[in-house]
Image (spheres, grey):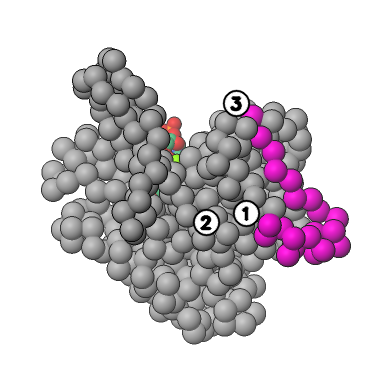
């Protein structure tokens, strides 16, 4: 098989633990033997982030901005235990957060639906795509621990020194407080990303907020979406798809009632929570893909939605064969390659990526799968090891 030549380089971000083991196998066994592709590699393993004082993360994000496409392996976001485990200089922030803040854009999380794999929520027969606003709110908040009596206020000071201050709470016992913000430009970008994505995929779009309580903060999201929608309204009508704002509690109820087939625009924290709920409802974190897309749709960073799968890595290190699902990571590669194919108008690369996805789906539908998926199919379903699964996929690419 002659290698397919690829013009645009791909920023390849490696990560940690079992996800990294799978990542190297995808790169070396499923991609590089078939593509003449320049990879610009960044090692975001926790040890290398520590060695470079996390500068490697910022560099990787800037490189994605230049090349317009990146693919990322799961990485450890250290907590206290990890700081101890890896003897880190400090508790570094989430690399995904750092990259998001540099690239801006919206994260779209989409389940890979496989006929053979039963879903926990049986009637979700079309994808629910969670669009997560990747900026601000609690992720850029400041917290305070209140240890004594006193007043907690929030204050805005303009350039001339004029102040606008409001009392939040008059504490007469210990407690906690929090302040967070968002920026209209970022909400406009979010709205454009969402309307564009819904149009491309031909799905209705719903924005959820709690604007009955947050009549300024959440209302700003609703008003900006309403304003931006005016520019997309005609195209939505032509495609017979909807845009609606709904209260978050109502939207959660609709999610359970409906059968999928829509994009749900979520504020940052809601998107964090709902994407895991939706992933589980569709079956497995191992079948959830994730794309960070710039508002104009030109820059994409793709990844699997799951983490570094620590429990499997511990087995792997002890020489025990694991049965780890590589599908979401393979789809991260195929989606990044499809984005390059679009940028370069490279039809052969597009076909290669489509074929890789079809092979994965067919393999699962024929009953060859990893343990996480087999457990969902029932006690009769057999499973294969990580290495066996890769052998099957490799053979199918070759033949
Ligand atoms: P996780 O790595 O997603 O794993 C949670 C559990 O889900 C696993 O123990 C495993 O269950 C199952 N699982 C997830 N992916 C699987 C796959 N591909 N195949 C088979 N089973 C799979 O989440 P976590 O344990 O909460 O986090 C571990 C580390 O990942 C943390 O350090 C966290 O910071 C990091 N993380 C990174 C990202 C990212 O980079 N995008 C996202 C989330 C978490 P069983 O053990 O039952 O088999
Ligand atoms: Mg999360």
Which image quarter has ligand 1?
top left
Of mark 1 and mark 2, the one earlier in the sequence is 2
Judge the density around disc 3: few (<14), some (14-19), many (≥20) Cα neighbours within 10 Å: few
Work out how far the residue at label 1 is from the one at label 2, CA to CA, in angstroms: 8 Å
Question: Badge 1 is on which residue?
Answer: 224
In space, the residues marked 1 and 3 are separated at their CA atoms by 50 Å
State which tag comes first along the sequence, 3 or 2: 2
Does the numbered disc 3 mark a residue whose Cβ is under 8 Å from ligand 1? no
What residue would you read off at disc 2?
A: 184
Q: Residues within 10 Å of mark 1 (few under 14, many from 20)?
A: some
Q: Which contiguous range is marked in magenta? A: 227-249
Which image quarter holds the N terminus?
Answer: bottom right
Q: Position of residue 291 (x, y in %)?
A: 53, 57
Look at the picture and state if 343 lies above or below 268.
Answer: below
Q: Are marks 1 and 2 in contact (CB under 8 Å)?
A: yes
Can residue 332 be seen? no
Q: Mark 1, mark 3: which one is toward the viewer?
A: 1
Foreground: 154 or 392? 154
Q: Residue at x 23, y 63 (%)?
A: 55
Specify the farthest residue to the top: 173
Which residue appears at 58% of the width and 37% of the height?
215
């Amino acid at each position: 098989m002659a290698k397919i030549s690829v013009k645009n380089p791909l920023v390849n971000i490696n990560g940690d633990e079992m996800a990294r083991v799978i990542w190297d196998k995808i790169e070396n066994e499923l991609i590089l033997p078939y593509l003449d592709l320049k990879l610009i590699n960044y090692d975001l393993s926790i040890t290398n982030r520590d060695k470079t004082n996390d500068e490697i993360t910022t560099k990787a994000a800037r490189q994605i901005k230049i090349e317009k496409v990146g693919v990322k392996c799961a990485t450890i976001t250290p907590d206290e235990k990890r700081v101890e485990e890896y003897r880190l200089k400090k508790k570094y922030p989430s690399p995904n957060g750092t990259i998001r803040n540099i690239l801006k854009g919206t994260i779209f999380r989409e389940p890979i639906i496989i006929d053979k794999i039963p879903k926990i929520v049986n009637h979700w027969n079309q994808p629910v795509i969670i669009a997560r606003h990747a900026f601000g709110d609690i992720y850029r908040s400041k917290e305070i621990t209140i240890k004594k009596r006193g007043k907690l206020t929030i204050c805005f000071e303009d350039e001339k020194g004029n102040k606008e201050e409001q009392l939040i709470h008059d504490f007469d016992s210990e407690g906690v407080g929090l302040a967070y913000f968002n920026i209209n430009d970022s909400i406009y970008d979010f709205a454009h990303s969402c309307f564009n994505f819904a149009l491309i995929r031909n799905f209705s779009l719903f924005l959820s907020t709690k604007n009955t309580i947050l009549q300024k903060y959440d209302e700003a999201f609703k008003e900006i979406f309403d304003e931006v929608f005016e520019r997309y309204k005609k195209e939505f009508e032509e495609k017979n798809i909807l845009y609606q704002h709904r209260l978050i509690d109502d939207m959660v109820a609709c999610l359970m009632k409906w059968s999928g087939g829509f994009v749900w625009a979520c504020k940052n924290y809601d998107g964090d929570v709902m994407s895991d709920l939706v992933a589980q409802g569709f079956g497995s974190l191992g079948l959830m893909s994730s794309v960070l897309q710039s508002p104009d749709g030109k820059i994409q960073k793709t990844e699997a939605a799951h983490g570094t799968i620590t429990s499997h890595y511990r087995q792997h290190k002890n020489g025990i064969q694991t049965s780890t699902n590589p599908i979401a990571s393979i789809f991260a590669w195929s989606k990044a390659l499809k984005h390059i194919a679009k940028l370069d108008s490279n039809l052969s690369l597009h076909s290669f990526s489509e074929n890789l996805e079809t092979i994965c789906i067919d393999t699962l539908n024929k009953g060859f799968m990893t343990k996480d998926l087999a457990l969902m199919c029932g006690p009769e379903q057999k499973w294969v090891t990580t290495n066996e699964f890769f052998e099957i996929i490799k053979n199918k690419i070759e033949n």
